[in-house]
Structures are given as C-alpha cells and as structure tokens.
Amino acid sequence: MSEDDLLLAYLADKIGQCEKEETVSYSYFLTSRQRIVAEQFCKTHCSREFLFWGGYEEAERTVCFFLPWYLAAEDFQTQQEEDFPFVLLRATPKGGVVLSHRDYLGALMGLGIKREFVGDLLVSPAGCDMIVFRKLLPYLKTNYEKAGRAGLCLEEVPFSAIAVPHQQREKVNLTVASLRLDVLAAAVFHLSRGIAAEAINHGQVFLNGQLIEKTEKSLQAGDKIVIRGKGKAIIKEIGGKTRKDKISVTVEKYM
C-alpha cells in the first residue's frame, strides 16, 4: 500500500470510531500535504462534521477531528483546552543559549518520539513552543532535558500565550517542466538543476519534515520544501499546462 492508502485507511477507522462510539475521534498530526489528501477524502466519506486544528491559526501540522452528531464545529473549538488531546510545551534553553529548530527536533527524535505525535515547533532566540500530544507530557518532562548543547527548562503554558514567530511570505507563480523534487527545488530557490540535485543527494533537502534523497520524487499541492541554508516554501497550487507544455505552479516562499 502507498503512504496515501495507509493514511486513508487510518482516517476511515477514525471515522468509523466516531460514528460507532458517538464520541470525538482524531488523527495524529498531519503535514500540509496529508491535510489536503485527508480533506478530499473526508468530504466524500465522512457523514459527520470534521475540522483541522493545530493549536493556532495557520498551523502547518494539524490534527483532523471527527465530531459526533451532537457537537458542532463552532462549539468544539470553544471548549476548554483540557479537552484537547494536545498541549503547548515551552522549552527554554539554560544559560541563554540560542538553539535551532534542528536542535529541538533532533532531541525529540532521539527520545524515540514519532514525528506524527508532535505538531509545529515554533522557534525563537528565547526558546521553542512545541505542540505535542498530551499523553507524551509526563515522559517529556522527565526525559527531554537537553537539546543541542544546552539543558532545557520545560513548562506547560496555555495556548493563549503561544509565541508565533513572524515570517513574511511571498507568493510566486512558476512554470516548470515537471513536478520532480530537483526541478521544483531549482525553480523555487533560483538554483541550477545540478546544484538542486546535489543538495538532495547530500541530505540537505527536506520534504514535509522528512529527509528526502531521491531527486525524482514527485511533489503535490501542500508539500513543504526546505533546503538548508536556502529557505523553505510550500506548494499552494498546481495548475494546468502552458502553451509550451510546462506546468503552472504557485508556491508560497518564506522570506
């Protein structure tokens, strides 16, 4: 089965759980691309209300919630935070050390935490606000003691206090010969295709938070591309072909 097939089977189980038990069911954290796939599936296969929420507006990683017949989406979103399956955990480095996104995420993965159990990591010079499933909280408070070269102080904080770094974005319209990773990466970040391929082969390119080393990987709407030292971008829309038989693509590039 493909990754999308596994995702859809998983979502079907969650829909069935909601309908059978008449209670809220929910997914793990979905990437931007997975959310698009999930939304298309749920519109045709879910008879109940569903919504996506990742702890704050414009969250990149979101959880899909399926609601029983007696609960409307607007009522669910106004519930108290203790009703949500995830929490906001603030990690502050000791000694004023400034850590990177890679430091925080690498330390989490080093503890055996699966990426789908962690939402967005919002990094600033002061620390990192991370959204994690509530069931991980006791384990993290005991074991998530260090990231990079610094010890960490952890505290659970309300979502109203979330620190979202301001990032400017630019919408860019491109035409490309194909939807291969090396082709799109080259067009988005103004690189030659050879340099883009070299970055991929040297482990410098991430797709939806995962290291990708296949230049021929085909991309879809919602995919997020990150190249170390170059920046990141999200594919917002894939259009039709131009007169010259190229593909129209709209991306949102982080400045």
Image: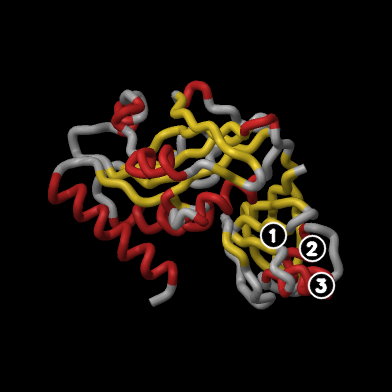
Q: CA distance from mark 3 to mark 1?
A: 17 Å
Q: Residues within 10 Å of mark 1 (few under 14, many from 20)?
A: many
Q: Quadrant of the N terminus?
A: bottom left
Which callout, 3 or 1, points at the residue further toward the start of the chain? 3
In this rendering, is residue 228 above or below 216? above
Tell me what residue is drawn at x 53 percent, y 52 percent. 32
- Secondary element under disc 2, as helix, strand or loop, is helix
Tell me what residue is drawn at x 74 percent, y 71 percent. 202
Q: Residue 85 in the image: x percent, y percent?
A: 33, 39
- For the residue pair 33 and 156, the one nearer the viewer reads as 156
Residue 45 seen anywhere in this rendered image of the structure: yes
Q: Quadrant of the C terminus?
A: top right
> What's under tag 1, amino acid-wise?
Val
- Secondary element under disc 1, as helix, strand or loop, is strand
Q: Is residue 189 left or right of residue 207?
A: right
> What's under tag 3, amino acid-wise?
Arg
Residues tagged 2 and 3 counted as in contact (Cβ below 8 A): no
In this rendering, is residue 236 above or below 123? below
Image mark for residue 26:
none
- Residue underneath mark 3: 193
Residue 246 seen anywhere in this rendered image of the structure: no
In this rendering, is residue 198 above or below 131? below
Image mark for residue 249:
1
Q: Is residue 146 left or right of residue 80?
A: right
Image mark for residue 187:
2
